[in-house]
Amino acid sequence: MGRMNTTRSQTHSDELLGFSIPTRDSRGRAVRLGPVLQDILAAHDYPPALKHALAEALVLATLMGGLLKDDEDQLTMQAQGEGGIVSLLVCDYRNGEIRGYIEHDEERMAAESANPSLDALFGKAHLAITFDIAKTGKRYQGIVPLEGNSLSAAVESYFAQSEQIPTLIRTAIKLGAGHTVAAGLLVQHLPEGEEGRERLHVELDHPEWEHVSILAESLRHEELVEPSLSLEEIVWRLYHEEDKVLVTPGARLSKGCRCTVAHFEDVLSRFPKGERREMADDEGIILVDCAFCSKVFPIQD
């Protein structure tokens, strides 16, 4: 029987949980979004299928954001489609703050079935994942086709193709009237001596990763979204036979829209005076609509 360290009370909703399995050279992140997710979704009157897509995207952005090293680093996930219902989906994560929105064709959405496929939603699309590293000012971006049955599958492809890190992701969404829950688990294999060593994906055999991923695949949808089941318990159910599982408290999550009058004034100041004049009404007011939170900000030019 293995053991798992814990450094705080059990984690249920709106907090990240990190963990690692040293003997398997593996790490993971787990999250369950509750009130924070409902707050984000409440900003728009999305139909259920789009709520489901955005909820999954927010879980994925949070799981990947949890891999960032420093508080001011940012993860942005953007899916752009052509020929589908959704033209743009954007989510980002920074220091525990998450936000996201979807641009879509309302008429086409109303005519679509209740459970449209990923292809019906996005058409021909790609997924761009961007890491902005605050300390160095560098930006790293990977782009992969948005293919498969889910956004989660596309993110797995991103890690396999762009990062060359074997990754398995499980997500679960439970839509309810005023009580939507979305959760996810991400596990990765980081080969021993990663720098200067052969990447795992080119090795012929990696039984340690197969063991970790097979156990993760056994995780049930109901377990992920069950509010009474802590994230620590989920990890323990999967990996209790390991020699050691190290648990690391993650960020407490909040809705992170960064729209303020000062921010929009700064953005508008970069436009030529003539263009700002065209944007303004007869009283010299420019109305700026925040796509993330649906608030309108009157800015005096």
Image (cartoon, rainbow, N blue to C red):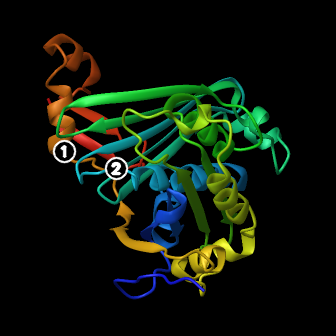
Secondary structure found at label 1: helix
Q: Is residue 204 left or right of residue 136?
A: right
Q: Is residue 223 left or right of residue 21?
A: right
State if disc 2 and disc 1 touch (CB < 8 Å). Answer: no
When the figure is inspected, residue 252 is found, relative to residue 153, above or below; the finding is below
Residue 68 image label: 2
Check disc 1 and give the amino acid type: Val
Q: Residue at x 58, y 62 (%)?
A: 185
Q: Residue at x 54, y 50 (%)?
A: 189
Give the quadrant of residue 89: top right
Q: Position of residue 252 (x, y in %)?
A: 35, 70
Give the quadrant of residue 14: bottom left
When the figure is inspected, residue 253 is found, relative to residue 120, above or below; the finding is below
Residue under numbered circle 1: 261
Q: Quadrant of the N terminus?
A: bottom right
Q: Position of residue 174 (x, y in %)?
A: 69, 68
